[in-house]
Image (cartoon, helix red, strand yellow):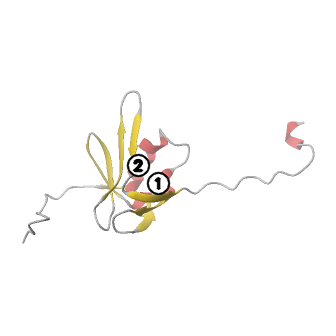
Amino acid sequence: MTDQFYPEQPAMDYLDGNMLAGPLAEVFAVDLTTATGRCASCGRTGPVAGLRIYANAPGVVARCPSCQEVILRLVRTPTSAWLDLRGATFLQVPMPAEPVMMPGPNPTAM
């Protein structure tokens, strides 16, 4: 039975968020598939790699696996990349720890 506000939509095949590693590597110096994000619609928090990716469009669309709302859109043109993250409240990107700088001469610079 279909709801008047949410008619049945045809089933779409999707990939997982790991598919974003290549396209996002063109834009960012870190692997964003390891980032954690929160869905602005339902509040689900999880890794970007866990998003459902729909690539049968003029770009890539990533949807929340819980509520199906769009979290991320990425479109690449010959001269730029367009990234829309309005469906996420945040992205927490893991970064390597910065090395501790010791006072004194740098032995590797000698």
Asked if disc 1 and disc 2 are in contact, CB closer than 8 Å, the reply is yes
Residue at coordinates 11% horizontally, 63% vertically from top-left? 8
Q: Is residue 8 above or below residue 106?
A: below
Residue 86 vs residue 55, the one in the foreground: 86
Q: Quadrant of the C terminus?
A: top right
x, y (%) of residue 58? 27, 39
Say whether residue 66 is left or right of residue 5: right
Q: How many marks?
A: 2
- How much space separates mark 1 and mark 2, taking CA atoms? 7 Å
Q: Name the residue that disc number 2 marks.
A: 20
Q: Is residue 80 above or below residue 62?
A: above
Q: Quadrant of residue 63?
A: bottom left
Amino acid on which disc 1 is placed: Thr
Q: Name the residue that disc number 1 marks.
A: 33
x, y (%) of residue 5? 13, 65
Residue 45 vs residue 29, the one in the foreground: 45
Amino acid on which disc 2 is placed: Leu
Secondary structure under tag 2 reads helix
* Label 2 Cα neighbours within 10 Å, binned few <14 / some 14-19 / many ≥20: many
Q: Specify whether residue 4 is in view.
A: yes
* Label 1 Cα neighbours within 10 Å, binned few <14 / some 14-19 / many ≥20: many
Secondary structure under tag 1 reads helix
Residue at coordinates 79% horizontally, 54% vertically from top-left? 100
x, y (%) of residue 32? 49, 51
